[in-house]
Image: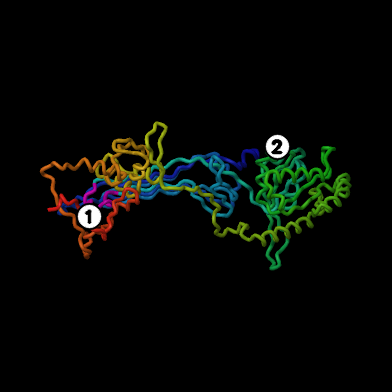
Amino acid sequence: MSDAVEFVDSTSIHVRGGRGGNGAASMRREKHVPRGGPDGGNGGRGGDVVLEAQRGQASLLDISRRPHRRGDDGGHGSSQRKSGADGDDTVVTVPIGTVVRTTDGRILADLTRHAQQFVVAEGGRGGRGNAAFANRHRRVPRFAEYGEEVEEYTLRLDLKVIADVGLVGFPSAGKSSLVSRLSAARPRIEAWPFTTLTPHLGVMRAGDHADGSPIDVVLADVPGLVEGASDGKGLGHRFLRHVERCRVLLHVLDTSPFDPGRDPISDLEVLRAELVAHDPALAERVEVVALNKVDVPDGAAMAEMVRSELESRGYEVFEVSAVSGAGLDALRYRLGDLVAAARAGDPEATDDGGEAPIVITLDDHGPAYRIGRDPSGVLAVVGRQVERWVQMLPVNNPDAARYLQGRLRRAGVVRALVKAGARSGDDVVIGDMLFEFEPELDDLPPDERAEILAGEFDDADPDDVVGRIEVAEATDDPMADGEAPDDGLHEGAPDDEGSDNVDPDAAATVPADRED
């Protein structure tokens, strides 16, 4: 099987969390227990879909072959307050260095540590059974919630190889040969360009630290670059992204190229230009030059000619041969020193398996809901939480509909709809449901409320009851000032607009002709 089939560094994944289980609506039925009351249990939560970075995985091949991943559904609740089982999470392993993006390119997570996890699709909430809705005002609820429905998402996974040293160079410059001599990696080596089509990693022992611990360096054999790679030529975009995470760049220059019009200095200029065009931050990386193929007489002569010019430009130059092994020890230990220094300056960047936060970019969700008009001109309430309330409740049940109306009032949705122009009898869309709007009197603007109330009075009505309005003195009675006792069922305080605030210190008056 070819490298192109075995190695996949970019793929799509379609994920969906498990659906929440339904709550149960049941009544306790036992011998000698009359009117046992509601005892429906809650539904279980749906399972999540989780991405987990694993050190032993090197490709996204498995995901590309099975791109659809689902969390398990939650179990349904049952009588005797038995809750449904939670759905199992689906854990999908990915290589370290995997970047998770939305289809429009926004980064959600960057998994750079072993065993780091990121939830790409949450499971749905389990619906509450009717026992959860029982209180002193609603003693026998006859409804329960459905489990939350969840959406399917399509995400993009891109792998950026994590290595200490990235070997970059033109095709056939000898990068794979160097990696095979410096490490135990065995990349494919042939005598023609673009033999390497996928990155290869190798671990190189490069000396010891001051405390005697070994310095192990990860080398990345990146496929050959050509002029125009930053614009996609020669699969440049796929190749260049594997260099982004390398601490040290090793430019492997061919001192005996096939093309007579090339030389190491012009090759280096082209390579650096393509790297900077792809990511300007690469210009700040530590760079080392390896003049390869000095075992060939023409190569040795070319290396002697260009070495002083490269050093005058500030590059550290090593003359090496991947065939004979000349100069490799000096290169090996110098790379070890540079990597150790880079690690010391950025200790959090090492893949030590420790706990570290995942880099996540979150949306600014803004308000909990928005009110606008759909293409047909009908008012619509858009918001995940409000839509979830509607989806999970059996709104055809009168008790459930009354409960939903209270939730919408407490959340300020009813008042917001009135401000948006909704009036009695108008259609309102929430989620997949169409409702007929019936606002409460207190939610209407003061002028409209006064107009409605004015129609309720008739001075000529003989049954009209006339009485004196009095303001009671302050007492310890919680009902004295017109406020209900705190029973934990507040409808939510209205805003200033449309509220009827009474000043208790002001004397109440009535027209003289109405007094007894």
Identify residue for label 1: 136
The residue sitting at 68% across, 65% down in the picture is 213
Q: Quadrant of the N terminus?
A: top right
Which residue is the extreme one toward the left? 462
Question: Is the residue 251 above or below the residue 478 in the image?
Answer: above
Q: Is residue 404 visible?
A: no
Given contact means CB atoms under 8 Å apart, are the residues at marks 1 and 2 in contact? no
**Picture coordinates of residue 88, whole percent (x, y):** 42, 49
**Picture coordinates of residue 164, whole percent (x, y):** 68, 54
Label 2, residues with CA under 10 Å away: few <14, some 14-19, many ≥20:
some
Q: Which mark is residue 378?
A: none
Q: Which residues are magenta?
A: 129-141
**Picture coordinates of residue 50, whole percent (x, y):** 49, 49
Q: Earlier in the sequence, mark 1 or mark 2?
A: 1
Magenta stretch, overall SS: loop
Front one among 417 and 99: 417
Q: What kind of residue is marked 1? A: Arg
Q: Which mark is residue 234?
A: 2
